[in-house]
Amino acid sequence: MKIKTHLWDGLILFLVTAFLILPLALTFFYSVFTEWMDILPTGFTLSFYAGIFSDGAFINSLLRSIVISIVPVVICTIAILLVLYVITLYVPKLEKYIEILCNIPYAIQGVILAAGIISLYSGKPGFLSNRIFLLVGAYCIIILPYVFRGLKNIIGALNVRCVIEAAQVLGCSKLHAFFTIVIPQMKRGIISTMMLAFTMIFADFVVVNMIAGSAFRTAGIYLYQTMSKSGQTSSAIIVILFITTLLISTFTLMIQNKAIKSTKGRKA
């Protein structure tokens, strides 16, 4: 029975892995061949990748995508941490209302959100009419439910009140204890939540196209403009975006692991 169970587990894992990896693998193969008119492609080439990396517009759009994805994630994470600090230690009765408020964006489609923001703030004086500012705000709204849920679950797994009370006995303030004792314990979960939020908006096209348009050309807009010109080039861009996300995730995890090892070394 155990052997059969292991076989079924292995088969299910293989099927799920194939289901996730196969589309990306086919996209990659399509991007390195000039023709795919039969079962097997013909004409191996890396010219599509060379053309993309030699285009300064793509590099700029990729950097814009990274920056415009990181900024909302950082802002939203800091804001939610402060909110959780307040409702956990001072007004826990507000938690259910804050949760309802943060879950509202689940029901708002990106098109509706972008159209609403444009109609509300378009033509307003000052920074409210700045399209980049509006785009950052829109992304904060989109990732808000996921950041709140992730951070709330992490705090729920910790006995924050007891930790804060113990720190207060030793002469530490609540705010200082929260950010120097509680937050380091949440580090791994915070990074995972931030990476989830980052990947959600990194390759966005709909919202950025409606709010910023050609004034802020991101990788998503660059990809859309390329799709009508060359299928292989657009496939190569998709692969590059995936690898970029993978590299950022790997780099973040490396920093996280180094921080954890250094903390353990200090304790030892």
Image (cartoon, rainbow, N blue to C red):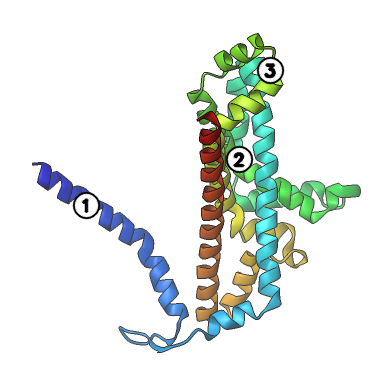
Kindly tell me whether residue 150 is visible in this rendering: no
| Depth order, front residue of 174/208 | 174
Q: Amino acid at mark 1?
A: Gly
Q: Which residue is mark 3?
A: 174
Q: Nearer the viewer, mark 3 or mark 1?
A: 3
SS type, badge 3: helix
**CA distance for labels 3 and 1:** 49 Å
SS type, badge 1: helix
Label 3 crowd bin: few (<14), some (14–19), many (20+), radius 10 Å: some
Residue 1 in the image, given as x and y percentages of width and height = 8, 41
Q: Is residue 105 left or right of residue 40?
A: right
Q: Amino acid at mark 2?
A: Pro
Residue in the picture at 54% in, 75% down = 234
Up-down: is 214 above or below 207? below
Q: Amino acid at mark 3?
A: Lys
Q: Are marks 3 and 1 in contact (CB under 8 Å)?
A: no
Which numbered circle lies on residue 105?
Answer: 2
Residue in the picture at 52% in, 18% down = 159
Label 2 crowd bin: few (<14), some (14–19), many (20+), radius 10 Å: some
Q: Nearer the viewer, mark 3 or mark 2?
A: 3
Residue in the picture at 61% in, 23% down = 97
Q: Is residue 33 left or right of residue 113?
A: left
Q: Earlier in the sequence, mark 1 or mark 2?
A: 1
Up-down: is 89 above or below 191? above
Which numbered circle lies on residue 10?
Answer: 1
Q: Is residue 33 left or right of residue 90?
A: left
Q: Nearer the viewer, mark 1 or mark 2?
A: 1
Residue in the picture at 53% in, 59% down = 247
Kindly tell me whether residue 156 is visible in this rendering: yes
